[in-house]
Amino acid sequence: QVQLVESGGGLVQAGDSLRLSCAASGGTLSGYVIYWFRQAPGNEREFVAAISRSGGDTYFPDSDKGRFTISRDSAKNAVYLQMNSLRPEDTAVYYCAAKGTLVRVPSPAAMDYWGKGTLVTVSS
């Protein structure tokens, strides 16, 4: 069982960039597809990005293509979500999740492991 820990959240202004990290405690991320989700107050948790086990393939919902990138560093046992041109509507708790396989339509219910999340607040 892998325990996921997110970090890097904070308060930023619209237009700023932020990099979130997802690290593993007690295990390795190498055997998992890693997903990022976010949940704003009153909203459902939504898919943000995913990266394959090799790091060679990345996936995004159409709505966020171009602003966010996802990468992984096997040596550091971490996955990163780079967010650029942040908007107030990006304000949410961001979670990383892990699953052994790629889910074509990622849903929270399909994930095997979750972190506790990191809060991103974007002011206008």
Image: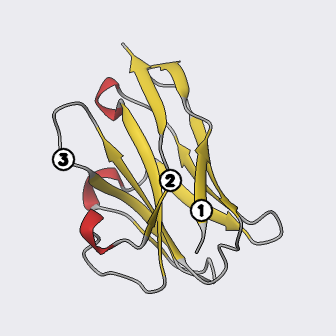
C-alpha distance separating marks 3 and 1: 23 Å
Direction from residue 22 to residue 97 in the image, left or right: left
Residue on which disc 1 sits: 3
Query: 25 above or below 111?
Result: above
Residue on which disc 2 sits: 115
Mark 3 secondary-structure assignment: loop
Visible residue check, residue 107: no
Residue at the image point whose x is 35% and y is 29% from the top? 91
- In this picture the colour scheme is secondary structure
Query: The residue under label 2 is which amino acid type?
Result: Gly
Residue at the image point whose x is 53% and y is 56% from the top? 69
Residue on which disc 3 sits: 44
Query: In terms of depth relative to the viewer, which is nearer, 108 or 13?
Result: 108
Query: The residue under label 3 is which amino acid type?
Result: Glu
**Sequence-earlier tag: 2 or 3:** 3
Mark 1 secondary-structure assignment: strand
Residue at the image point whose x is 58% and y is 58% from the top? 4
Mark 2 secondary-structure assignment: loop
Residue at the image point whose x is 36% and y is 13% from the top? 124
Task: Answer with the quarter of the image where residue 3 lies.
Answer: bottom right
User: Dots 1 and 2: beta carbons under 8 Å?
Assistant: yes
